[in-house]
Amino acid sequence: MEVSRSKWVSKATDNINRYLHRGGHLKGDEPQLLGGVSLLNTIGVAMGLPPTDPEDWTRSEMKKALKGNLVYFEGAARDIIDVIADQIRNCCGGDAENYVTVLPIEVYTKGILIEVPLFRVHRYKDSQKYYIDTIGRYYESFSDWFHTNKLPPGKMAYPYKLRLELHPGYDYLRVVVRDTPSARDAAEIVDTVDTIATVAEITSTAGLLFIPGGLAAPARISAGTASALWGIGRTTYQIVDKAIHGESLNPVTNAESRALWLGLAVNVVDLGAKGATRRLLARGRAAPNSTRAIVNGINRTHLTLRGIKICDETLYTIAHYDEVSLKKVLMLGCSIAFWTKDVYDFKTADVLIEESYE
């Protein structure tokens, strides 16, 4: 809902306070033992997903509903629910029933207040507690969630330490307001370096137009190597982060994972291409045919992977245009505009060698 900047904290606090008494007076933090249909329906209702229309239920479905055996969600909504339910069971050793507490998180971004649930789950009273968000990503502690959640840039309001309990000595719930991780200084620094790395190849080519031919290739290789190293480190970190928080790394079913794997492959091959080209130029006209063939092969592989990555990003942007940032759209446009005009990577080893002697 749209809320003014001056009123969003008050509205968010009211929303969170409603959960304090969920299930009875001051019982909001008490977990429910949930499994099967009850777990699926609880997740769906907590997320505000659209249920099926009772008017469309068959007689059999109505009987199931009256007995509490009907899941009220299907299609895309059910797919979202299943991801979270599977992660709950995964965190709890595969148990069919587990203790679940629904925690309200209020996110204020771009003038909109969004309520997203966080599910605290555990197997029994004193067992390890996990926090699972709406994309099926799990966190092992409050600190882990606070520092690594993937909420959009903005502000987040949440019950203190993710506990729905009265503030000690007071008769109200303590609500904390902080920047989301993606809105903090560290995230902005990383985002800035990502942008710099993305345009490094573009700007380096423009700048190297003023460098004599024999020096341009080595200079461009050095600039590209730094960009590739940053890309390898950054994508590796993101892949590891997804893995340790239980997110899918399947490139076929998960668009974000596919983009990361393609990005890693492009940067690894790019680094290899830069290294091979550097060795080629060092030997010059004395370079054997085998070295020239290797350089040609690596450069063609890099070009192919980069093309696949650009196509993947283009299709994702078209399908999720309202969700992607303006920066991403602009950078994708720059990438397409530059790489479709570029001729450097189309050059064979022989041409590269001859140009280095100009």
Image: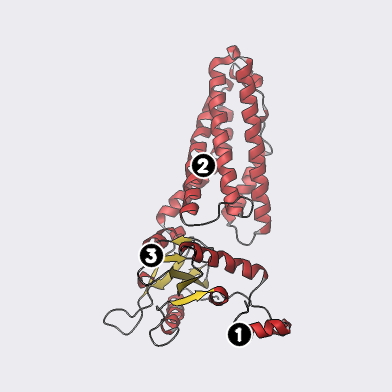
Mark closest to the chain's N terminus, 1 or 3: 1
The amino acid marked with disc number 3 is Gln
- The quarter in which the N terminus is drawn is bottom right
x and y percentages locating residue 150 in the rendered image: 49, 60
For the point 65% across and 67% down, the residue is 76
Front residue of 79/269: it is 79
Secondary structure, mark 2, is: helix
For the point 58% across and 11% down, the residue is 286
The amino acid marked with disc number 2 is Ala
The amino acid marked with disc number 1 is Lys
| Mark 2 to mark 1 CA distance (whole Å) | 58 Å
Secondary structure, mark 1, is: loop
x and y percentages locating residue 204 in the rendered image: 55, 34
| Mark 1 to mark 3 CA distance (whole Å) | 33 Å
User: In which image quadrant can residue 58 be found?
Assistant: bottom right
Numbered mark located on residue 197 in the image: 2
Q: Is residue 67 above or below residue 351?
A: below
| Residue farthest top in this picture | 286
Numbered mark located on residue 128 in the image: 3
User: In which image quadrant can residue 37 be found?
Assistant: bottom right
- Reading the image, the residue beneath label 1 is 67
Q: Is residue 178 above or below residue 196?
A: below
